[in-house]
Image (cartoon, helix red, strand yellow):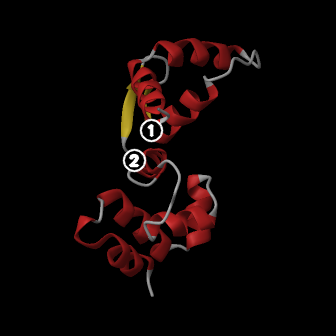
Amino acid sequence: MSAIANARLAWGDDLPDWIAALAEECDRTSQSKAAARLERSPSLVSYVIRNRYPGDMGAVEEIVRGTLMSESIECPVLGSTGKHICRKWRVRSRTFENVNSQYVTMFRACNRCPINQATTDLQETSND
């Protein structure tokens, strides 16, 4: 059975556009290649397509939208950048590392960014 058929079976009429894009990428290439492109495991991709992923589905959505759907945001440092790149820097900004000047710049910028603040607020709310 194709990935898009599995997605439609699992998600029904509420199939999100980003799940459809992920499933179509799996059918076009392979589940392993789609996972590698997202920098995630093939099993995560399978769980997401089958609507059985117990983790942060919003995080996966951002990665899919940025990587496969070319959605972008305006970063005060990087300019127009993919949502998946923004997410990587937001995750990295949780701890300070004086690796190079770009890490320091992004640490400061991400910790002041409204997008990061909204994400942090959501995480704190979901942990209650």
Q: Residues within 10 Å of mark 2 (few under 14, many from 20)?
A: few
- Left or right for 26, reference 102: left
Numbered tag placed on residue 70 in the rendering: 2
Residue 128 point in image, percent of width and height = 47, 32
State the residue in front, 87 or 66.
87
Disc 1, SS: strand
Residue at point 69% right, 17% down?
96
Disc 2, SS: loop
Q: Is residue 14 above or below residue 124?
A: below
At label 2, the amino acid type is Ser
Q: Which is more N-terminal, label 2 or label 1? A: 2
Tag 1 near tag 2, CB within 8 Å:
yes
Q: Find disc 1 in the rendering and name its residue.
A: 82
State the residue in front, 71 or 97.
97
Q: Quadrant of residue 4?
A: bottom left
State the residue in front, 41 or 127.
127
Numbered tag placed on residue 18 in the rendering: none
- Left or right for 60, reference 9: right
At label 1, the amino acid type is Gly
Residue 93 point in image, percent of width and height = 60, 23
Q: Is residue 57 above or below residue 46?
A: above
Residue 20 point in image, percent of width and height = 35, 66
Residue 119 point in image, percent of width and height = 44, 29
